[in-house]
Image (tube, rainbow, N blue to C red):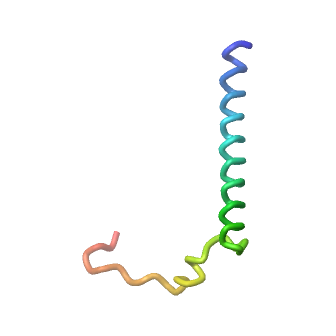
């Protein structure tokens, strides 16, 4: 195999492998929580964000 095909194949394989790993880990977290929802953070902290402190506006 030449480098012209090997490098793109390795790049695609890496992206697919990382995506598969992330999906697998997401499934493990949902199973461990016994809750398929994405995050409890927005459920418990879903109110509007606090105002910026004076002098920190961008």
- The residue most toward the top is 2
Specify the farthest residue to the bottom. Answer: 47
Q: Which residue corresponds to the image point at 72% horizontal and 61% vertical from the top-left?
A: 27
Residue 52: horizontal and vertical position, in percent? 35, 79
Viewer-nearest residue: 32 or 1: 32
For image coordinates 73% across by 71% down, the residue present is 36
Q: Position of residue 17 (x, y in %)?
A: 69, 41
Q: Quadrant of the C terminus?
A: bottom left
**Residue 56 vertical placement versus 26 (above, below):** below
Left-right relation of 25 to 44: right
- In terms of image quadrants, where is residue 37? bottom right
Q: Residue at x 71, y 75 (%)?
A: 35
Task: Please state if 54 lies on the left or on the right of 35 as rendered.
Answer: left
- Seen in the picture, residue 38 relative to 22 is either above or below; the reply is below
Using the image as rendered, state which of residue 32 and residue 54 is in the foreground: 32
- Number of callouts in the render? 0
Quarter containing the N terminus: top right
Q: Nearer the viewer, residue 22 or 51?
A: 22
> Horizontal placement of 22 versus 45: left or right?
right
Rendered location of residue 23, percent (x, y): 71, 54
* 56 w.r.t. 10: above or below: below
Please tell me in which quadrant of the rendered image residue 30 appears: bottom right
């Amino acid at each position: 195999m030449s480098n012209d095909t090997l490098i793109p194949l390795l790049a695609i394989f890496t992206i697919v492998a990382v995506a598969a790993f992330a999906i697998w880990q997401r499934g493990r977290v949902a199973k461990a929580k016994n809750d398929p929802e994405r995050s409890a953070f927005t459920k418990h902290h879903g109110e509007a964000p606090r105002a910026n402190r004076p002098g920190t506006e961008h």
